[in-house]
């Protein structure tokens, strides 16, 4: 396969309706927010969801979570050693190691990866062409906290467990925006192709498929729009910052409660026509 032939920029508009899009483990798993009260979804969280969708689409992925593991390997070291070429590699073989890892796993040639394991003399870093920003809400979000109790004992005992308290948190409603880019120069190094870009595009469009949980019930997380800019050259007709600024998401009412309370527009750039897609 030929490597990516042109630079790509993209933006993703997401809607959160009574869900916890990304809990902060250092803050009681409350939805992440910045000091201005705007909600946040970390880039790590977004890449985890993209990796999960890659696996759903039948693609080999190196960084698999335990609950979505498909190959039986529950550590990155074991997964790397399952590849005969990587298992035999030495420290001096870093270029070959990176090339084989990129050939084998889509997420490595997309996002890059650091291969450095305890007890191994191999230390290899791969820079990937796909970069993605954290998602931030357009407006400050309201977070509701609910007290919950257990209705059954976890272990045998005389005491009733209904007095065991817990807390759940949710964002009542919020519209989040994230941006990303695919760099041709780095794509040439990892072997990232136009076909790979199509898979990333499909993963973004269906980001929350098979992602439901008690914190994110089915239908509470929605991909509203994917804006996809394909430049006509490897270096890009415009900088990514200028392209990303073309997206305008603004509320139409004082207190928005649904995606219909927002306007989404894309300002034109001469010679660069975006593809605007509805999430599925």
Image (cartoon, rainbow, N blue to C red):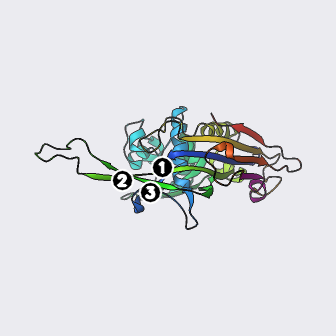
Counting labels gives 3
Residue position for label 1:
20
Q: Residue furthest front?
A: 254
Disc 1, SS = loop
Q: Which of the image's four quarters has the N terminus?
A: top right
Q: Which mark is residue 30?
A: 3
**Which numbered mark, 3 or 2, is in the foreground of this view?**
2
Looking at the image, which residue is at 50% across and 40% down?
A: 52
- Where is residue 246 shown, x and y percent of the image? 78, 53
Label 2: which secondary element: strand
Of the numbered discs 3 and 1, the one sitting upstream in the chain is 1
**How busy is the neighbourhood of tag 1: few (under 14 within 10 Å), some, or many (20 plus)?**
many
| The residue positioned farthest toward the left in the image shown | 158
- In this rendering, position of residue 238 left or right of residue 110: right
Q: Are marks 3 and 2 in contact (CB under 8 Å)?
A: no
Asked if the magenta segment contains residue 243, the reply would be: yes
Q: Are marks 2 and 1 in contact (CB under 8 Å)?
A: no
Foreground: 88 or 254? 254
Q: Which label is found at residue 5? A: none
Q: Which residues are magenta?
A: 241-250
Q: Which mark is residue 167?
A: 2
């Amino acid at each position: 396969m030929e490597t990516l032939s042109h630079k790509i920029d993209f933006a993703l508009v997401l809607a959160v309706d009574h869900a916890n899009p990304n809990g902060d483990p250092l803050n009681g798993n409350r939805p992440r927010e910045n000091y201005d009260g705007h909600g946040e979804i970390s880039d790590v969280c977004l890449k985890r969801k993209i990796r999960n969708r890659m696996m759903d689409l039948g693609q080999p992925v190196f960084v698999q979570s335990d609950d979505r593991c498909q190959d039986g390997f529950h550590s990155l070291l074991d997964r790397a050693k399952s590849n005969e070429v990587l298992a035999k590699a030495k420290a001096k073989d870093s270029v070959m190691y990176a090339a084989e890892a990129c050939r084998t796993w889509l997420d490595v040639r997309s996002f890059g990866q650091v291969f450095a394991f305890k007890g191994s003399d191999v230390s290899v870093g791969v820079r990937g062409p796909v970069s993605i920003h954290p998602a931030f809400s357009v407006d400050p979000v309201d977070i509701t906290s609910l007290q919950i109790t257990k209705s059954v004992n976890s272990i045998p005992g005389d005491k009733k467990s209904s007095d065991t308290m817990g807390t759940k948190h949710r964002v009542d409603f919020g519209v989040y925006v994230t941006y990303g880019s695919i760099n041709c120069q780095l794509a040439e190094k990892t072997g990232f192709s136009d076909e790979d870009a199509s898979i990333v595009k499909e993963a973004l469009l269906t980001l929350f498929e098979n992602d439901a949980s008690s914190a994110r019930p089915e239908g509470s997380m929605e991909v509203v729009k994917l804006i996809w800019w394909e430049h006509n050259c490897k270096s890009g007709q415009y900088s990514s910052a200028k392209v990303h600024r073309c997206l305008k998401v603004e509320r139409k009412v004082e207190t928005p409660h649904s995606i219909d309370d927002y306007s989404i527009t894309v300002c034109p750039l001469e010679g660069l026509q975006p593809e605007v897609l509805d999430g599925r």
